Amino acid sequence: MTACLKDAAAGSARLIPSAGRLWGILFLTQPGPDLSPEERDEVKKVATHLLERVRAALVLDWRHRAQSRAQVRLAIEDVLDEGLPRAYTPEFYQGKCAVLFEHVFESFGDGGQTDATT
């Protein structure tokens, strides 16, 4: 997965100006439904909004408190529900929510910091 992120970051630098939202775009599109160029643009916007909402939901010791974990999960679900194109079926939506929460849980520290290279 790390190699995929690094390859995508190197090859898509002109298309994805913020490396911070790269993880969201990759998790939302790989694997994912076939998207039109307009839908891909929507997904990029969702990824940007998702990163902002997740970072806002991360508080000190968020991993250790059920309510804080639930707020992070809800932030992910809300952003995806509101912004993903119709090409994302309920099954894709549920899968993406689960994968993204798992990634956030493993990658973001208790204060919200992350190492974008891993």
Image: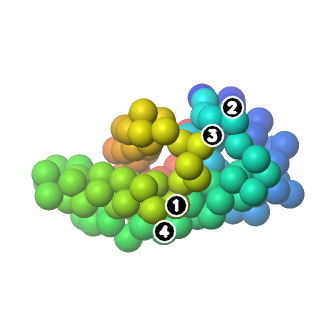
Q: Name the residue under label 2.
A: 4
Name the element at disc 3: helix
The numbered mark, 3 or 4, whose residue comes first in the sequence reads 3
Q: Nearer the viewer, mark 3 or mark 4?
A: 3
Q: Nearer the viewer, residue 49 or 40?
A: 40
How far apart in space, not on screen, are marks 3 and 4 (Cα)? 19 Å
Q: Label 4 amino acid?
A: Glu
Q: Nearer the viewer, residue 63 or 52?
A: 52
Q: Position of residue 54 (x, y in %)?
A: 40, 61
Look at the image and name its color scheme. Answer: rainbow
How far apart in space, not on screen, are marks 4 and 2 (Cα)? 23 Å
How far apart in space, not on screen, are marks 2 and 1 (Cα)? 25 Å
Label annotation for residue 83: 1
Label annotation for residue 11: none
Q: Image height check: is 24 above or below 45? A: above
Question: Looking at the image, do the residues carrying marks 1 and 4 touch, with CB atoms under 8 Å apart?
Answer: no
Q: Can residue 52 be seen in this view?
A: yes
Name the element at disc 1: helix
Q: Which of marks 1 and 4 is in front?
A: 1
The numbered mark, 2 or 1, whose residue comes first in the sequence reads 2
Question: Looking at the image, do the residues carrying marks 1 and 3 touch, with CB atoms under 8 Å apart?
Answer: no
Name the element at disc 2: helix
Q: Label 2 amino acid?
A: Cys
Q: Label 3 amino acid?
A: Thr
In what quadrant of the picture does the C terminus appear?
Answer: top right
Q: Mark 4 points at which residue?
A: 52
How far apart in space, not on screen, are marks 1 and 3 (Cα)? 14 Å
Q: Where is residue 89 in the image (x, y as percent from the top left)?
A: 49, 39
The numbered mark, 4 or 2, whose residue comes first in the sequence reads 2
Q: Label 1 amino acid?
A: Gly
